[in-house]
Amino acid sequence: MHSLSTAITGFDATICFAAFSWGVKKHFRSTGAMPLGMKVTSLLSLALFAAFVWHIAQGASGLWLGSLGLFTGSLAVFAAAVAASHRTPPTLAFDTDAPNFLLQHGPYRYVRHPFYLAYVLFWLGTAVAVHGVLGWIAPLLMTALYIEAASREERKFANSNLAVAYKAYRARAGMFWPRPLALLAG
């Protein structure tokens, strides 16, 4: 069972990481060259994913089913965010464009940054899948980067023609986690 749980966990994580990589290349748009912050995020993600693969090759933790749940949730949120934004894809993280549309359907109805939520769930899944404290470095580092990227995006909206609409949207939708009252309202 040990090698099967390790293989399943590694496979599921690889599917998520491949989907995210596809998103960078094929879904998100850029207003020019890839922003430096996005390059750093991509390289750090690749290095941390390689470290995860090395760790998981030593065997998945006894909590590997929890990691599968996190990977599944991550992929579901990612797919829902792609579906909601396929007609008007957002720009890459750290892009300096001025926003000209506001997505508020699909997962955007509940969270302002569903892609970052998907990524955070993924990195939490990697931490749960491996043994030891070192596995928690990736979710901490990557979540810090996502908070920085999301904060920059929030400032772009606050300084755009969409500032009033975005302020109302912020009151309804959480940054990465849904607001409980918004969930109850449906």
Image (spheres, grey):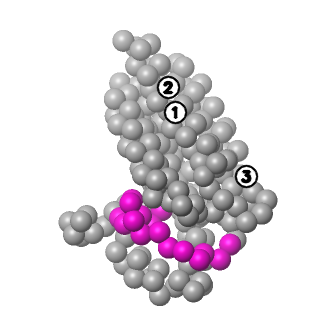
Q: CB atoms at circles 1 and 2 under 8 Å apart?
A: yes
> Would residue 69 appear left or right of 53 to someone viewing this image?
left
Mark yes or no: residue 118 visible: no
How far apart in space, not on screen, are marks 2 and 3 (Cα)? 25 Å
Q: Nearer the viewer, residue 132 or 24?
A: 24
| Element at label 3 | helix
Is residue 103 located in the magenta-colored stretch of the structure? yes
The residue labelled by disc 3 is: 39
> Would residue 9 appear left or right of 26 to someone viewing this image?
left
Residue at horizontal 67 percent and vertical 47 percent from the top: 25
Quadrant of the drawing holding the N terminus: top left
Mark yes or no: residue 13 visible: yes
Where residue 13 sits in the image (x, y, percent)? Answer: 50, 32
Where on the picture, by quarter, is residue 185?
bottom left
| Element at label 1 | helix
The residue labelled by disc 1 is: 15
Where residue 171 sits in the image (x, y, percent)? Answer: 36, 78
Specify the farthest residue to the left: 184
**Above or below 60: residue 111:** below
The disc label shown at residue 11, or none: 2
Where residue 67 sits in the image (x, y, percent)? Answer: 39, 34
| Element at label 2 | helix
Which residues, given as a range, are shown in magenta? 97-113
Quadrant of the drawing holding the C terminus: bottom left
Task: Say which label, 2 or 3, has the lower sequence index.
Answer: 2
Pointer 3: residues within 10 angstroms few (<14), some, or many (20+)? few
Secondary structure character of the magenta stretch overall = loop
Pointer 2: residues within 10 angstroms few (<14), some, or many (20+)? some
